[in-house]
């Protein structure tokens, strides 16, 4: 799918960020971040399918933990947010992962399908640009193996009545999504039967490490001006090729 930001791009970015972390927290951090990225990929795929016009969403994250390592992770993840601005011509995502990293991406959809990524945080400032289709992975194939169970339950979020769905991936990990059908996706994506039938306003997951992550929408705006959402690479920052990022991440 040319109009979906590559999950592999996110995973590589996370591996770069944590490559030099101490061993005791490395695996916990990496597993949690990778799980977040998988959820973001699914969410972005769903929203992209629905976005007939510019739409903006902002989510806040709540982190709960039952382990000592998880408590440190929760402290580092405090204040995490995610913003999405998506239209048929352009995708923009900014993920603030607490004090660890801010990741901003802009994907201009068209013949070139060019993506710009800016990473800022404990690893310094890095920028990458290129066609995400050049990063080969099996994300789309894996998505086909996800099982979604629709549950007879509802809750109100931002004035929208949301329905519940539970997704289980091929590894047995589960995530809970609360979605509204009031924001419809357009015609022509019936080839994606496993996608949620509406916009997710809350999603919850429990990756390894005794940590539960819950992202809840706090703002939804329709008909936004997509020219306001861009990646601004700081002057003096070298813009590297996406393939270089793949090599750095061990991909």
Image: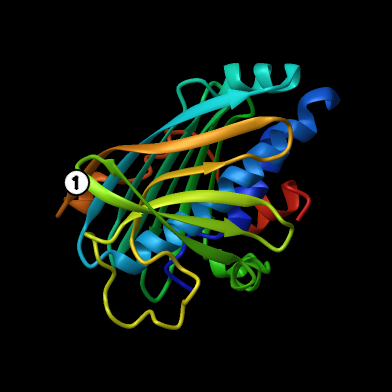
* Residue that extends furthest to the front in the rendered view of this protein: 152
Task: Give residue 59's position: percent from left, percent from top.
Answer: 37, 37
Task: Give residue 201's position: percent from left, percent from top.
Answer: 35, 46
142, above or below 117, in the image: below
Q: Judge by depth and name the residue closer to the eye, 153 or 82.
A: 153
Q: Measuring 42% from the left and 64% from the top, which residue is drawn there? A: 196
Task: Give residue 133's position: percent from left, percent from top.
Answer: 56, 70
80, above or below 114, in the image: above
Q: Is residue 27 left or right of residue 197?
A: right
- Could you tell me if residue 137 is visible in this image? yes
Task: Give residue 219's position: percent from left, percent from top.
Answer: 25, 38
Q: Judge by depth and name the residue closer to the eye, 90 or 126.
A: 90
Quadrant of the rendered image containing residue 188: bottom left
- Could you tell me if residue 240 is visible in this image? no
Badge count:
1
Q: Is residue 83 left or right of residue 98?
A: left
Badge 1: residue crowd in 10 Å (few <14, some 14–19, many ≥20):
few
Q: Is residue 219 left or right of residue 242?
A: left
Location of the C terminus by quadrant is: bottom right
At numbered mark 1, what does the secondary structure look like: helix, strand or loop? strand
135, above or below 14, in the image: below
Residue labelled with disc 1? 221
47, above or below 229, in the image: below
Q: Measuring 46% from the left and 77% from the top, which residue is drawn there? A: 192
Q: Judge by depth and name the residue closer to the eye, 78 or 233.
A: 78
Quadrant of the rendered image containing residue 6: bottom right
């Amino acid at each position: 799918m040319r109009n979906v930001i590559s999950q592999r791009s996110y995973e590589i970015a996370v591996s770069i960020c944590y490559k030099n972390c101490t061993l005791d927290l490395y695996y916990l951090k990496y597993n949690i971040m990778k799980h977040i990225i998988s959820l973001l990929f699914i969410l972005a795929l769903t929203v992209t399918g629905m976005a007939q016009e510019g739409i903006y969403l902002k989510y806040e994250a709540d982190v709960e933990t039952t382990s000592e390592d998880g408590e440190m992770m929760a402290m580092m993840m405090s204040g995490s947010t995610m913003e999405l601005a998506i239209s048929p011509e352009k995708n923009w995502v900014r993920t603030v992962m607490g004090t660890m990293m801010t990741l901003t991406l802009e994907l201009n959809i068209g013949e070139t399908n060019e993506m710009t990524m800016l990473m800022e945080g404990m690893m310094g400032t890095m920028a990458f640009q290129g066609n995400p289709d050049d990063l080969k992975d099996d994300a789309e194939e894996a998505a086909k193996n996800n099982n979604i169970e629709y549950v007879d339950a509802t809750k109100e979020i931002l004035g929208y009545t949301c329905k519940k769905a539970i997704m289980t991936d091929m590894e047995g990990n589960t995530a809970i999504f609360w979605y509204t059908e009031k924001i419809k996706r357009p015609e022509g994506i019936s080839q994606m039967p496993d996608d949620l039938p509406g916009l997710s306003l809350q999603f919850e997951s429990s990756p390894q490490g005794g940590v539960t992550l819950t992202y809840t929408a706090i703002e939804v705006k329709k008909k936004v001006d997509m020219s306001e959402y861009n990646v601004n690479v700081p002057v003096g920052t070298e813009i590297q090729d996406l393939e270089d990022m793949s090599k750095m991440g061990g991909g």
